[in-house]
Amino acid sequence: MLDAEAAGNRGYSGLHGWMTAAERIWNDNSESGSMTLVERWNYHNELGAQFPIPRLRVVYAASGTNPAACVLRNSDAAIEHKLYWGTPTSEGEAAYLTAIFNSEVSRSRISSLQSRGQWGARDFDKVIFTLPIPRFDTSDSLHNDLAAAAAEAERVAMAFELPESVKFQRARKLIRDALTESGIAPQIDQLVARLLDQENNP
């Protein structure tokens, strides 16, 4: 993590100037003064833990009316604080997890654990992990079926043309509607229900 001084020492003059101004504003407005700007950005090592950035990640939103998860294949992107992320071992595992995280079945089964706001249930955070989600197993046909269905859902979502300047909430709904109309969302819900019921009743 480079502060203004470290950036200057390494010859990053543009970063040095920007960080100097940012640190000045932080120091002038910080209430406690006990944490530097870089320490705040890396609170609990949430930024540092991302490096080196993995090639493949599963990312999901911490809050929203409906869950939103995706596979991220970009080793240049750092994850900001309103997203949770994990590093799957394979494309198959990544697809399997996004199928579970995005399903209406999962949302409905954790809704009673979510915090409530003006518009109803809001925060997902880590309540998704109260579900009995088994580790991805390539020898399990149900796991493979879920991964294949998620890959198909990704293809449908990528092919869907969003209107220009659409806001992200509307974009999410349009994509969800397209997935439902294609039949892949109901298929995923059926598979997720089987998976979770199987884990509850081994």
Image: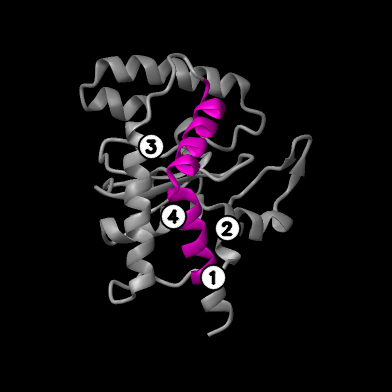
**For discs 3 and 2, the disc positioned in front in the rendered view:** 3
Give the residue at mark 4.
Answer: 99
Mark 3, residues whose alpha carbon is within 10 Å: few (<14), some, or many (≥20)? some
The residues bearing labels 1 and 3 have C-alpha atoms spaced at a distance of 25 Å
From the top left corner, tell me how far across and down residue 100 is, in percent. Answer: 48, 58
Identify the magenta region. Answer: 167-196
From the viewer's perspective, is residue 34 above or below residue 19?
A: below
The residues bearing labels 1 and 2 have C-alpha atoms spaced at a distance of 9 Å
Give the residue at mark 1.
Answer: 196
* Location of residue 118 (image quadrant): top right
SS class of the residue under badge 1?
Answer: helix
Give the residue at mark 3.
Answer: 157
> Does the residue at mark 1 contact the one at mark 3 (Cβ under 8 Å)?
no
Give the residue at mark 2.
Answer: 106
SS class of the residue under badge 3?
Answer: helix
> Does the residue at mark 1 contact the one at mark 2 (Cβ under 8 Å)?
yes
SS class of the residue under badge 4?
Answer: helix
> Does the residue at mark 4 contact the one at mark 1 (Cβ under 8 Å)?
no
- Marked residue nearer the N-terminal end (4 or 2): 4
- Marked residue nearer the N-terminal end (4 or 1): 4
From the top left corner, tell me how far across and down residue 37 is, in percent. Answer: 49, 31
Mark 1, residues whose alpha carbon is within 10 Å: few (<14), some, or many (≥20)? some
> Does the residue at mark 4 contact the one at mark 2 (Cβ under 8 Å)?
no
The residues bearing labels 4 and 1 have C-alpha atoms spaced at a distance of 12 Å
From the top left corner, tell me how far across and down residue 196 is, in percent. Answer: 54, 70
